[in-house]
């Protein structure tokens, strides 16, 4: 069998054998439950740095790449939650939010260790500290992204009103928002694959799974959004008031499956080279 066919099949066989679907469901649920604590902490950090609204604006910008039926209910609830959260970085609520949001990182670690066939031997408190570090870095990156994709365009729009001659420059910079979000997601995937598992890997060893995850996730998001636009009543008829939650879980579970399979693909490529 040709390598380009054998490797994806081998990756899927190991995905099945290592309970990939169950791990993906765990990642999806952990991500959904960690999303709001993470944004609460990011808001507290933004308030400490002088702008409490940055996390809210960045979350909205990031969710723009999701299908509207998935993103809109989450954006609404994010606005509601962050409007009521305090801005103190060292409040008990912010500390707890930091801790609970790290559970999502732990779920990603479990998925990659399963995919790469690694056994975790580090102490649990060291792993939790590393996850807290990922959350802290992620919050800073989210605020920086907000400055780039939200605040800068607003400033440029204001400049355009004051100096219409700069309108072509403003329109030329419009794609920067999409590029910035894509680069942020790509960077996050590289960091997660490289440093979260029990054993670190080189960029050469992880790039196939990273690219696969990014491309297939974007394709799935487009296809899922296309489906929901044409058959919006399917989930409402089945889940009634829980439709938005179930849609979000299904979306995140599929993305998590793609993520875990990306790790399996990297492992399968390495096995093929060894053989």
Image: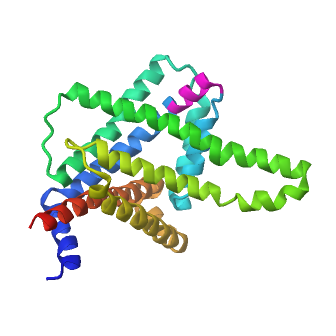
Residue 161 drawn above or below residue 257: above
Of residues 11 and 22, which is closer to you in this image?
A: 11
In this rendering, the count of numbered labels is 0
Image quarter (top left, top right, bottom left or bottom right) of the C terminus? bottom left
Counting from the top left corner in percent of width and height, residue 165 is at 89, 58
Q: Quadrant of residue 33?
A: top left
Of residues 96 and 200, which is closer to you in this image?
A: 200
Counting from the top left corner in percent of width and height, residue 45 is at 54, 27
Of residues 264 and 166, which is closer to you in this image?
A: 166
Q: Residue at x 31, y 31 (%)?
A: 130
Residue 79 visible:
no
Residue 245 drawn above or below residue 175: above
Q: Residue at x 45, y 69 (%)?
A: 219
Is residue 79 found left or right of 42 in the rendered image? Answer: right
Single out the residue that lies furthest toward the bottom: 1
Counting from the top left corner in percent of width and height, residue 6 is at 17, 76
Q: Quadrant of residue 48?
A: top right
Figure coloring: rainbow
Is residue 109 found left or right of 66 in the rendered image? Answer: left
Image quarter (top left, top right, bottom left or bottom right) of the N terminus? bottom left
Magenta-colored span: 42-50
Q: Residue at x 29, y 60 (%)?
A: 262
Q: Residue at x 49, y 35 (%)?
A: 139
Residue 95 visible:
yes
Is residue 34 found left or right of 70 in the rendered image? Answer: left
- Magenta region, mostly helix, strand or loop? helix
């Amino acid at each position: 069998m040709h390598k380009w066919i054998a490797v994806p099949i081998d990756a899927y066989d190991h995905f099945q054998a290592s309970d990939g679907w169950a791990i993906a469901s765990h990642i999806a649920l952990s991500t959904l439950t960690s999303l709001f604590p993470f944004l609460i902490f990011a808001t507290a950090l933004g308030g400490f740095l002088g702008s409490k609204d940055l996390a809210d604006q960045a979350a909205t910008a990031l969710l723009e790449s999701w299908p509207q039926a998935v993103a809109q209910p989450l954006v609404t609830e994010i606005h509601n939650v962050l409007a009521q959260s305090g801005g103190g970085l060292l409040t008990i609520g912010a500390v707890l939010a930091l801790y609970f949001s790290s559970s999502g990182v732990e779920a990603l670690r479990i998925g990659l260790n399963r995919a790469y066939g690694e056994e975790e031997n580090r102490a649990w408190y060291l792993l939790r500290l590393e996850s807290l570090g990922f959350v802290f870095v992620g919050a800073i990156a989210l605020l920086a992204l907000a400055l780039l994709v939200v605040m800068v365009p607003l400033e440029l729009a204001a400049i355009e009103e004051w100096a219409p001659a700069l309108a072509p420059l403003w329109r030329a910079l419009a794609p920067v928002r999409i590029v910035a979000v894509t680069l942020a997601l790509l960077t996050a995937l590289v960091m997660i694959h490289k440093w979260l598992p029990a054993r670190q890997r080189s960029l050469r060893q992880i790039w196939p799974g990273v690219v696969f995850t990014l491309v297939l996730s974007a394709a799935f998001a487009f296809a899922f959004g296309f489906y929901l636009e044409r058959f919006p009543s399917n989930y409402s008829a089945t889940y009634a008031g829980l439709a938005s939650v179930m849609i979000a879980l299904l979306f995140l579970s599929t993305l998590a499956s793609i993520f875990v399979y990306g790790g399996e693909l990297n492992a399968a490529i390495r096995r093929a080279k060894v053989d």
